[in-house]
Image (spheres, grey):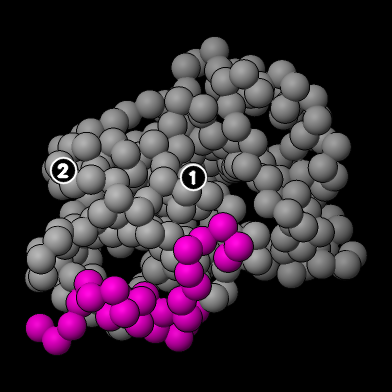
């Protein structure tokens, strides 16, 4: 039997967005795949702290912070935070343009309190009240703390929220040499929800690093995702699968589409490709 290595995005793929409990069918798929000799890795934009509640389940390792922090079992394989100069430059130009920031470290995430204040002020307008409820739920479930609690830890990624796409024009010009801007089409709740990721890494580079370390050819890897921040992973793996609840853009680039996370999609896809079965 050919040994495969499987990479799973979390939000919208392994779990419903912002949650930490996978469906029983997904856990069964993972358990049976590992029992058959395959490896299963988390591959997420979340930082290590945000994905840590999932580590009580049996994974072989994690690619966190969109590839900036990688662990193979108990081994730290890759660790690439921003330099202090990069961090200062990025935060200065983003805040100059009125962009709200959440910075992600290994041990926590910290968000500009001004964003929630803005939403509360405009809670009666359009989708702002829904956005406020969503933001409060995400901050609670993923342990996002106010920026006043930040104590200078190394930063791996910045999540950005802007009212208008044009607010990111100057930051892109200033930062594009060192950073990639992941900006989904459309935007959530009328806001631009984007990520600033170091060009030294991405999920695809993380896949290559893990495959090389584990001695498994990249062509024997399978990746599951649902959103544009999974693009590099899906373009790198040997077989790419998008969830039915994923974006249309990602469905077009994936090799195939499987049922949604809420419809036992992972288990069905694992079965179809012979990754799991009765154990």
Magenta segment includes 276: yes
Please rate how many residues cluster around mark 2, counting C-alpha atoms within 10 Å: few if below 14, some from 14 to 19, many from 20.
few
Looking at the image, tell me whether mark 1 or mark 2 is earlier in sequence order.
Answer: 2
Residue at 21% x, 59% y is 4
In the image, taking residue 48 as reference, residue 11 lies left or right, namely right
Q: Position of residue 153 (x, y in %)?
A: 42, 27
Image position, residue 188 (x, y; %): 72, 60
Q: Which residue is mark 1?
A: 232
Side of 176 where 240 appears, left or right: left
Quarter residue 113 falls in: top right
Q: In percent of the image, x 75 and y 49: which residue is there?
A: 192
| The N terminus - image quarter | bottom left
- Residue 55 in sight: no
Give the CA distance from mark 1 to mark 2.
20 Å
What number is the disc on residue 214?
2
SS at mark 2 in the image: helix
């Amino acid at each position: 039997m050919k040994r495969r290595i499987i990479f799973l995005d979390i939000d919208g793929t392994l779990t419903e967005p912002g949650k930490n409990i996978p469906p029983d069918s997904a856990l069964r798929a993972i358990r049976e795949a590992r029992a058959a000799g395959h490896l299963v890795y988390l591959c997420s934009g979340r930082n290590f702290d945000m994905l840590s509640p999932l580590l009580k389940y049996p994974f072989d390792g994690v690619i966190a912070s969109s590839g900036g922090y990688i662990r193979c079992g108990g081994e730290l394989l890759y660790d690439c935070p921003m330099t202090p100069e990069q961090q200062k430059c990025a935060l200065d130009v983003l805040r100059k343009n009125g962009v709200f920031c959440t910075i992600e470290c290994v041990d926590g995430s910290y968000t500009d309190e001004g964003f929630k204040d803005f939403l509360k002020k405009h809670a009666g307008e359009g989708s702002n009240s829904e956005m406020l409820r969503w933001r409060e739920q995400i901050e609670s479930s993923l342990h996002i703390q106010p920026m006043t609690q930040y104590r200078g830890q190394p930063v791996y990624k910045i999540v950005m929220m802007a009212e208008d796409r044009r607010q990111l024009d100057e930051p892109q010009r200033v930062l594009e040499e060192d950073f990639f801007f992941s900006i989904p089409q459309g935007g959530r709740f009328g806001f631009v929800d984007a990520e600033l990721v170091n060009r030294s890494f991405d999920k695809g580079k993380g896949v290559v690093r893990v495959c090389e370390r584990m001695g498994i050819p990249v062509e024997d890897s399978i990746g599951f995702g649902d959103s544009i921040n999974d693009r590099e992973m899906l373009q790198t793996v040997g077989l790419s699968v998008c969830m039915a609840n994923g974006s249309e853009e990602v469905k077009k680039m994936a090799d195939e589409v499987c049922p949604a996370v809420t419809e036992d999609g992972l288990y069905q896809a694992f079965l179809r490709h012979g990754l799991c079965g009765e154990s």
